[in-house]
Amino acid sequence: MTATTSPEKAASPTWVRCTRCGASVYHRRLARELQVCPECGHHRRLGARERIAQLVDDASFVDAPSRPTADDPLGFIDSVRYVDRLAAARATTGEHDAVVVGTATVESHPAVLAVMDFAFMGGSMGVAVGEAVASAADLAMERGLPLVVVTASGGARMQEGVLSLLQMTRTAHAMALLREAGLLSVCVLTDPTFGGVTASFASLGDVLVAEQEALVGFAGPRVIAQTVREELPDGFQGAASLLANGLVDRVEPRERLRPLLGRLLALAHGEVAPAPDAAPARGAVATPGDATARGSGAATTPDGRPVGEESPSTDARPDPWQVVQRARDPQRPTALDQLAGFDDFVELHGDRAQRDDPAVVGGLAALGGRTVMALAHQKGHETRELVAHSFGMPHPEGYRKAMRLMRLAERLGVPVVTLVDTPGAYPGVAAEQGGQSVTIAESIATSSRLRVPVVSVVTGEGGSGGALALATADRLLVCENAFFSVISPEGCAAILWRSAEAAPHAARALRLTAPDLLALGVADEVVAEPRGGAQSDPEAATATVRRAIAASLDELCALDTGELLARRRARHRAAGSRPGLVEPSFPDPQGPHGPLDHLSPGSSS
């Protein structure tokens, strides 16, 4: 970077010394590295024009006209007159104030940009900055474009007193209006971003991306140390800490910012091209319009069998306990395996309050030429991965993340797709104290009133309210070897039969398999799986799930909002009103006099 736009000075016109590791780097190489030290990875601060040049397509940026503001509303003088400080900053940076606003394309996708310059009086926010940010939001609404904001600020501009403070209201209101307009906003938080900027527009973007190594917070480390005398933990207010605490969606090195913005803008514009399916169509999926497929076994699997038929040599459906074991198989495709087959998926993190719960993953995705918001329970294949994702059991933070992304989907007018695979919500002390039941209830209520279509697929376990929180939908699909139940078979057996031995019997009694759910009117479709379950051919299985989702979205997205909500209300209002199953949908291998005949619900073993 140039000496005129950074506090870090070059050692010579051609060599720049890294302030972290001390290495001297040839200036042209440093430019190729986007002002990131090739020796230690230190991200040097950038001026607004340098940042713009790195993020947008060549020659695409056009400055937006600025509205004049008073230079010195208070007539402020400290050791130097404020007007003189302004004049010096303008001479140094070549900018009128600390924000540059304009339009550009990023990876060919148009957007409005507002980029801050820390070299202009520490990027402090005064009336001119507030006006620039608000004007950028106005311009985005006027043109129907996404807004990209790049922040770098020490906080409020003290020389403008309470007028500086009021810019927090001004900019927050502008971002709120942008939300109401259904336009995407992305805030890129760079080093440093503090004070009133963080507590207003910088934290109100739909997507928050922290540049690697950025320090972001409200009160600066020095203020905290001097005021409350608290010892600051390692990494405090650093980008990685923000991600772990659920306060940003992503942390990216500088080289990945432009590609990420391009993907987000493409998804926001709906400019996603359908990708060829990874696997050829090898069979049918039961559809809502196929009367013979509903509960009759007429739908076929990818290898041509009737859904539920274990092999050509038997007419019986798989035993429900066998289905439970298949649904729990750690080799079944996980949510991230499924989402990897979408045309694109940009994962977003965090509940913006406490932490990022890895048991719930979500983000903007593209499927069949359509932008969707994908939400899913994530487990894993290996023990370490399963533990890291709490075996797919969400904490309250996971449901808060899901609700945040549901609301974002509604604002952007894109449908929601959920993939359900969880034993249930996490049963821990911290989860209870954090409001587990409240967040599940709020998640169900939120999804029940979304003004966009919702399609849910139970891909493995559908355990109780922890699953229902992501399965309250317009269309519920259940994979052939998945199950959905009020309680696990083991839990049911422990309560009613008071014996773990009774779990297989409980599985049969609960009627939790896909064909049973279809017959009960709980499920709308059974999604076929390869012989032996999805784990036997994950590629074919995930392709079938994608086709089923796309077909449901085609139908639901054709409905106007009023009809969508009316159908959803009727669906939820009628829950459980269909007559129950009279005849068993499976043979009981235990028989009427099987080994569990001595156990009855409520008895002791």
Image (spheres, helix red, strand yellow):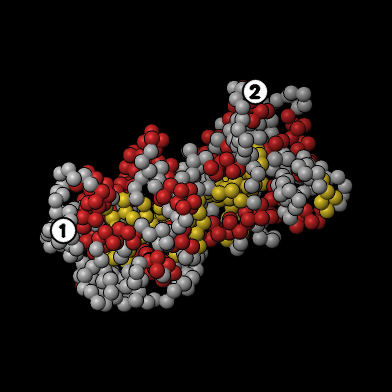
> Where is residue 361 drawn, in percent x and y?
45, 52
Please give left or right for residue 121 compared with residue 173 in the image: right
* 66 or 94, nearer to the observer: 94
- State the residue position of label 2: 226
> Where is residue 323 drawn, in percent x and y?
29, 61
Please give left or right for residue 146 compared with residue 495 in the image: right
Q: Residue at x 69, y 55 (%)?
A: 54
Q: Quadrant of the C terminus?
A: top left
**Label 2 is placed on what type of residue?**
Gln
The mark closer to the camera, 2 or 1, is 1
Instruction: Tell me: residue 362, above or below residue 92.
Output: below
Q: Residue at x 59, y 43 (%)?
A: 240
> Where is residue 592 drawn, in percent x and y?
12, 59
**Label 1 is placed on what type of residue?**
Gly
Mark 2 vs 1: CB contact within 8 A: no
Q: Residue at x 24, y 77 (%)?
A: 313
Instruction: Tell me: residue 156, above or below residue 131.
Output: above
> Where is residue 373 drawn, in percent x and y?
43, 56
- State the residue position of label 1: 594
The image quadrant that residue 556 belongs to is bottom left
- Density class for disc 2 (Cα within 10 Å; few <14, some 14-19, many ≥20) is few
* 472 or 170, nearer to the observer: 472
Element marked by disc 1: loop
* 376 or 119, nearer to the observer: 376
| Residue 538 visible in rendering | yes
| Residue 269 visible in rendering | no
